[in-house]
Image (cartoon, rainbow, N blue to C red):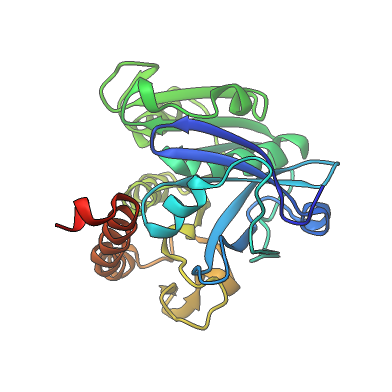
Amino acid sequence: MKKFEIAHKKTLTPEIGQISVYAPLVAAKAKAGQFIILRVDEEGERIPLTVSSTSADGLVTVIYQKIGGTTLALDELNEGDCLQDLVGPLGLPTEVENVGRVAVLGGGLGCAIALPVARALHEAGNQVDLIGGFKTKSIVILEEEMSHACTDLHICTDDGTYGYHGFVTGKLEELIKSGVKFDRVFAIGPLLMMKFACRLTAQYNIPTTVSMNPIMIDGTGMCGCCRLTVGGEVKFACVDGPDFDGHKVDFDEVIARNATYRDFEAKAKEKHLCRLGGGAMNG
């Protein structure tokens, strides 16, 4: 198998894809919570993606959402094609120890990151409640994989079409009020989800770790786009994290800054689609 060759490709939903890439050196060292940076081709931009899983035969699996030009280009590759670059593992791994009972919250695509974290915590001897949240049943991903990575799996949907009707924070609070004593919570997903999860756990004095992957762009700390304030100090998600004490993160600041990049992503996606469509789409 060639370096950075795509060994497996899978469509999880119309908007989310999964690839397994041959990168044995990365696969041998990657731990839960870490990420890689890849380039599709020589002229492509570098994008960070969290490692979802690795295998003994040297494969690194990542899951991506087709949200911008680069991820659309990535999705055009097929099994047997090779990436231009793949480097890692980067970032600090999630601190994994046996603390007792933990809840791991994953929101949407964040479940791809919650999966290896839950798996590592479960293998360390913790009783793990994995709570995965999605808008509706048709976009639930990784359910079987998550069921094997925890003690109890709770699927939530915003519209009630599958599992618990409501947000992951609602399910977490339901478990707490039923008498479950959590020693730690990990929240991974959209910024608003993590913000409100931390607000909830603060009420019950439960230590909470959040993964700030959603704000990473360059992945090396050079661009400064992933800076955030944690306990009054400036940190960079890609080099100081991506995991941080959620009760110390200034989420309002992060959410406001992150919104400034939406237009750039939309324009990059539009440009890529126009290139695929040729003159017809440009006219």
- Please give left or right for residue 5 compared with residue 191 in the image: right
The vertical placement of 144 against 233, above or below, is above
The vertical placement of 95 against 19, above or below, is below
User: At x 46% / y 81%, what residue is drawn?
Assistant: 223
- Please give left or right for residue 67 compared with residue 6 in the image: left
Between residues 226 and 46, which one lies in front from this camera angle? 46
- Please give left or right for residue 211 compared with residue 278 in the image: right
Between residues 145 and 177, which one lies in front from this camera angle? 145
User: At x 23% / y 64%, what residue is drawn?
Assistant: 263
Place of residue 226 in the rendered image (x, y in percent of width and height, measured from the top left): 44, 72
Place of residue 64 in the rendered image (x, y in percent of width and height, measured from the top left): 49, 47
Place of residue 13 in the rendered image (x, y in percent of width and height, measured from the top left): 43, 31
Image quarter in which the C terminus is found? bottom left
- Please give left or right for residue 161 compared with residue 123 in the image: left
Between residues 122 and 70, which one lies in front from this camera angle? 70
User: At x 40% / y 17%, what residue is drawn?
Assistant: 163
Count every numbered label the image shows and give the total.
0
Residue at the limit of the structure toward the front, as seen here: 279
Between residues 277 and 178, which one lies in front from this camera angle? 277
The vertical placement of 27 against 162, above or below, is below
Place of residue 168 in the rendered image (x, y in percent of width and height, measured from the top left): 39, 34
Q: Is residue 54 visible?
A: yes
Q: Is residue 99 visible?
A: no
